[in-house]
Amino acid sequence: MSTPRDEPIRFGIVGCGVVAPTHAVALDGIVEAKLIAVADASRNRAETFAKEFRVPRVYNDYRELLQDPEIDAVTICTPHHLHAPIAIAAAQHGKHVLVEKPMATSLEDADRMIAACERAGVRLGVVFQHRFDPAVRYVKRLVEEGDLGRIALASVYVKWFRTQDYYDPDSWRGKWATAGGGALINQAIHAIDVLLWIMGDVERLSGYYDALVHAIEVEDTAVASLRFVSGALGVVEASTTTYPQTPERIEIAGSRGTVAIAGEEIVRHELAGRGADIPDIHAGDPRFRGKSYYGASHPRLVEDFVHALLEGRPPLVDGHQGRRVLEVIFGIYESCRTGREVVLRPKGEGGSW
Ligand SMILES: NC(=O)c1ccc[n+]([C@@H]2O[C@H](COP(=O)([O-])OP(=O)(O)OC[C@H]3O[C@@H](n4cnc5c(N)ncnc54)[C@H](O)[C@@H]3O)[C@@H](O)[C@H]2O)c1
């Protein structure tokens, strides 16, 4: 599966909307990669994007881009429901696949994507860039090394704000069929992914959701309570209804210490016998370009994907990792719909990652 070569790995981006420039800038900063093509269902959008980022090849139909033999890998930046069909088609054309979050709108689609990439011998990566945030890595290490003692509570709070315009009736957002859900699968998914990466699997959960402020089908507000396989408990708060928007917060509290990350910064760091000084961890990346809440780590994740291709190893966030957070989010949706607790891993089964 490795791609030993002197030439850069040639990428195509499918979907030239809001997030796509972040990928173009990331690729531009990686010497071993080159963006050579873009595709968008809107020709105008594809052409404008290609002009801005000096991309030589422009396609209106992603299937034409996939037939381009010069392209080694694609980055999928389309609405959620298109991730699976485009990724599977890309794999069938022998292209490596980097797909934006959430990787799919159902676990079945996620499984089909993983299987298609394995069958074709191509790599599958999922964009959870916050795993590369220095603050997240620092806290993960603290937990792994036992510095917080026995972890009792591990929670995420995503109190964001979106106007009704964001859910324009013509948009794919705000609909089950095209977005797969709302505040959980579109916004809080990053923080939940980080929580799982640090804390390991969830054993069981229960949740509530509603559309409290926006006129949309999907949830704009949700809460869930979690029990991890480790025995720790936690909560998820997710919303696009709370003004003013505050940075998403991840808080982990154990018998010997408490840490909290807000956005990309460590904002609380109190360890027994070691005081409450906040460590000096810089989040910034000069290659960053995008909205502040995307963070600075897209370039780090794309670089890991490129190096994974060159080194013949899976990327840090591969398809299996991308699926894990979906299992929890779809579990919360199931609990919200049925009013029942959902057991993801019967006691004694499963572990951490
Ligand atoms: N990682 C992050 O921080 C982050 C941030 C924002 C968005 N995202 C994700 O990126 C993806 C795209 O989000 P966005 O905000 O850029 O959406 P968007 O609506 O702004 O852009 C989507 C683009 O896809 C194009 N498109 C639609 N159907 C297509 C098709 N069949 N073929 C080719 N192009 C097609 C649209 O014309 C549009 O230009 C989503 O999965 C979203 O969740 C991730």
Image (cartoon, helix red, strand yellow):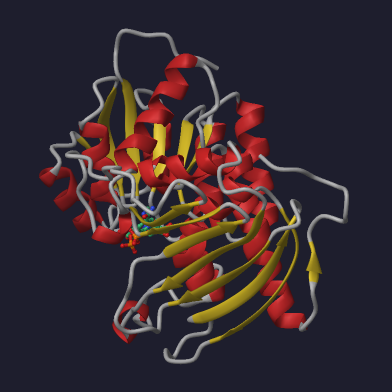
Q: Is residue 222 left or right of residue 333?
A: left
Residue drawn at (67%, 51%), measured in percent from left and top?
Answer: 150
Residue 231, by quadrant, is: bottom right
Residue drawn at (51%, 27%), measured in percent from left and top?
Answer: 94
Q: Is residue 208 left or right of residue 135?
A: right
Residue 286, by quadrant, is: top left
In this rendered view, identify the residue nearer to me: 329 or 19: 329
In this rendered view, identify the residue nearer to me: 14 or 27: 27
Residue 3 screen position, x and y as percent: 45, 14
Q: Is residue 311 above or below residue 260?
A: above
Q: Is residue 167 above or below residue 17?
A: below
Instruction: Tell which quarter ligand 1 is in.
Output: bottom left
Residue 29, by quadrant, is: top left
Q: Is residue 22 above or below residue 156?
A: above
Which quarter shows the N terminus? top right
Which quarter shows the C terminus? top right
Residue 352 screen position, x and y as percent: 70, 42
Residue 110 screen position, x and y as percent: 63, 49
In this rendered view, identify the residue nearer to me: 52 or 59: 52
Q: Is residue 233 above or below residue 77?
A: below
Q: Is residue 286 visible?
A: yes
Q: Is residue 172 left or right of residue 155?
A: left
Residue drawn at (56%, 79%), measured in percent from left and top?
Answer: 222
Residue 129 screen position, x and y as percent: 40, 45
Residue drawn at (58%, 52%), measured in percent from left and top?
Answer: 256
Q: Is residue 219 visible?
A: no
